[in-house]
Image: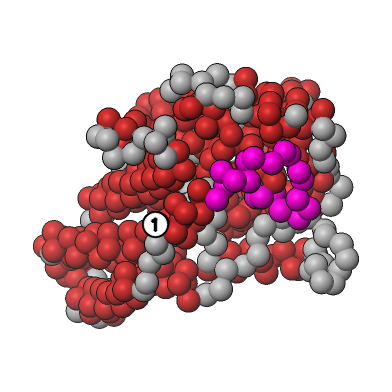
């Protein structure tokens, strides 16, 4: 094993170069395919663009507040009003993608490529497409560079294998139905019955294919956060734990709600596997900065209707128990005794295994606990929290940590393989490289959607906007897309915007 590690180290530059180049080709191929399929004139992406326009100061936030007033005045459905309020409240959640769209539009205008006053649908689509696709591709490729720059010796192949395995599963395994997964639709059937058994199987399916909404190969902000998380764990495993703790700060500017999840999991892994690491200033400083930034910017809990009193109670119960144990001598002695047992168990189970393996096992155990928690709480919670909080929390967790878990599990097997076979590095590199080349050719050679077709579809929306507001049952996209289109059009071209539409 030691001899093979030495060989791997000598070949670090070549092995890492092959791994990073093939990872670029495969990741960018799937990512571009997702961009061609999912980036278009639709409510969610128009909303992201509008948030970029607001953050750049071109237009105020008043239009989103007026949207809620208009919906209330026309007695729109409660769900439509809730969604409008929710979006208005977390417009600062995705500054990276939102501002990328806005500034791409500015660049196109300055170069004379498009102009909103000449052809607004074309300007809007191209600014959204290039802003989202190009900025996401740059960030994803930067993360892959960090991953293979940080990796050394036997860590390179597991990281490379994780990308290959996740890509293979993504393109071959049908995606699970994760949307509103904990909300019990009626009638049943045809809607599936929401049970704990079904939810656990759904989560296991999601580990293989988190779907385009959560996969690290996709284009959405939460997917880019997964790439940053992968880079963070590669840094952790290469001995750069302090540098890894800066990753949640980067995530907070890509998808604010993902940052506390990443930070909490990294801290939990260190508490179990190497608690002394958390006492280092190199780790404490970015942790404290992330907590301050999250407290200043995170609004998801309040948006979901969880009051400050409820949050204080949840945080106060464990603090109160800790103070009680400290104050009562018998309880303090019992807790010290129990703590020593737990510490010995922790040291025997996790400190003695490689850090990538320990992290992967802990994250997997955490996913089972999270699925159980989401299921139990969702059974008696408000319907909108079931849909937008509990049904999304565990898929986000899985998508965020799919690549680190795959890499950690592969690492456990890889160490055993290295001990048995001296030429394993060359053979594994050849096998994984061939797999990656097959996936890359498959993704890049398939026909691509026409940009002209998307622009033509965007132009048809102009005709629909001549009509007044009319809710379309069963289609949030058709009902809500005109709202954000009109707000963007008003920001660039002026006009009455929503006032005329709802009159």
Residue 369 in view (yes/no)? no
Q: Dot 1 lies on which element? A: helix
Q: Quadrant of residue 367?
A: bottom right
Q: Is residue 465 magenta?
A: yes
Image x and y of residue 19, in percent: 24, 64
Residue placed at 82% from the left, 32% from the top? 74
Residue placed at 45% from the left, 72% from the top? 171
Packing grade of label 1 (10 A; few <14, some 14-19, many >=20) is some
Q: Quadrant of the N terminus?
A: bottom left
Residue 59 in view (yes/no)? yes
Residue placed at 84% from the left, 52% from the top? 379
Image x and y of residue 80, in percent: 75, 40
Image x and y of residue 469, in percent: 73, 39
Q: Is residue 122 magenta?
A: no
Q: Quadrant of the C terminus?
A: top right
| Depth order, front residue of 244/337 | 244
Q: Read off the residue under disc 1.
A: 451
> Is 12 placed above or below 319 here?
below
Q: Which residues are magenta?
A: 460-478
Image x and y of residue 59, in percent: 51, 21
| Depth order, front residue of 481/4 | 481
Residue placed at 39% from the left, 36% from the top? 118
| Depth order, front residue of 428/276 | 428
Q: Quadrant of residue 420?
A: bottom left
> Is 295 placed above or below 378 here?
above
């Amino acid at each position: 094993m030691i001899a093979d590690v030495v060989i791997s180290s000598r070949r670090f530059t070549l092995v890492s170069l092959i791994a990073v180049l093939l990872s670029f080709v495969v990741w960018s191929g799937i990512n571009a395919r997702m961009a061609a399929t999912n980036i278009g004139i639709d409510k969610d992406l128009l909303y992201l663009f509008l948030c970029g326009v607001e953050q750049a100061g071109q237009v105020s936030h008043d239009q989103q507040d007026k949207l809620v007033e208009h919906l209330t005045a026309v007695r729109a459905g409660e769900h439509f009003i809730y969604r409008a309020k929710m979006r208005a409240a977390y417009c600062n959640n995705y500054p990276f993608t939102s501002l990328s769209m806005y500034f791409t539009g500015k660049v196109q205008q300055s170069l004379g490529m498009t102009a909103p006053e000449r052809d607004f649908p074309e300007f809007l689509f191209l600014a959204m497409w290039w802003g989202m696709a190009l900025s996401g591709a740059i960030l994803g490729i930067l993360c892959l560079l960090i991953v293979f720059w940080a990796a050394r010796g036997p860590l390179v192949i597991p990281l490379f294998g994780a990308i290959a395995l996740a890509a293979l599963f993504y393109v071959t395994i049908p995606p699970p139905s994760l949307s509103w997964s904990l909300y019990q639709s009626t009638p049943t059937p045809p809607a599936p019955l929401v049970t704990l058994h079904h939810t656990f199987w759904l989560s296991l399916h999601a580990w293989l294919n988190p779907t385009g909404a959560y996969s690290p190969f996709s284009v959405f902000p939460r997917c880019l956060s997964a790439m940053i998380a992968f880079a963070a764990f590669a840094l952790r495993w290469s001995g750069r734990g302090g540098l890894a703790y800066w990753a949640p700060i980067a995530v907070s500017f890509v998808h604010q709600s993902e940052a506390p999840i990443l930070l909490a999991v990294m801290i939990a892994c260190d508490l179990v596997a190497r608690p002394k690491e958390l006492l280092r200033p190199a780790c404490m400083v970015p942790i404290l900065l992330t907590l301050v930034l999250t407290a200043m910017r995170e609004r998801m809990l309040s948006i979901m209707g969880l009051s400050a009193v409820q949050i204080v109670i949840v945080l106060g119960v464990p603090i109160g128990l800790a103070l009680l144990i400290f104050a009562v001598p018998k309880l303090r002695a019992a807790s010290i005794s129990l703590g020593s047992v737990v510490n010995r168990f922790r040291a025997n189970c996790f400190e003695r295994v490689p850090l990538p393996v320990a992290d992967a096992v802990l994250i997997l155990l955490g996913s089972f606990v999270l699925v159980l928690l989401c299921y139990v709480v969702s059974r008696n919670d408000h319907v909108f929290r079931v849909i937008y909080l509990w049904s999304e929390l565990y898929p986000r967790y899985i998508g965020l940590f799919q690549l680190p878990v795959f890499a950690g599990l592969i690492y456990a097997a890889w160490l055993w393989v290295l001990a048995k076979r001296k030429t394993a590095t060359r053979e594994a590199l050849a096998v994984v490289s061939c797999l990656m080349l097959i996936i890359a050719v498959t993704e890049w050679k398939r026909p691509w959607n026409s940009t002209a077709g998307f622009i033509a579809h965007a132009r048809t929306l102009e005709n629909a906007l001549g009509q007044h507001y009319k809710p379309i049952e069963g289609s949030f996209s058709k009902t809500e897309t005109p709202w954000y289109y009109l707000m963007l059009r008003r920001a660039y071209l002026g006009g009455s915007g929503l006032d005329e539409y709802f009159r």
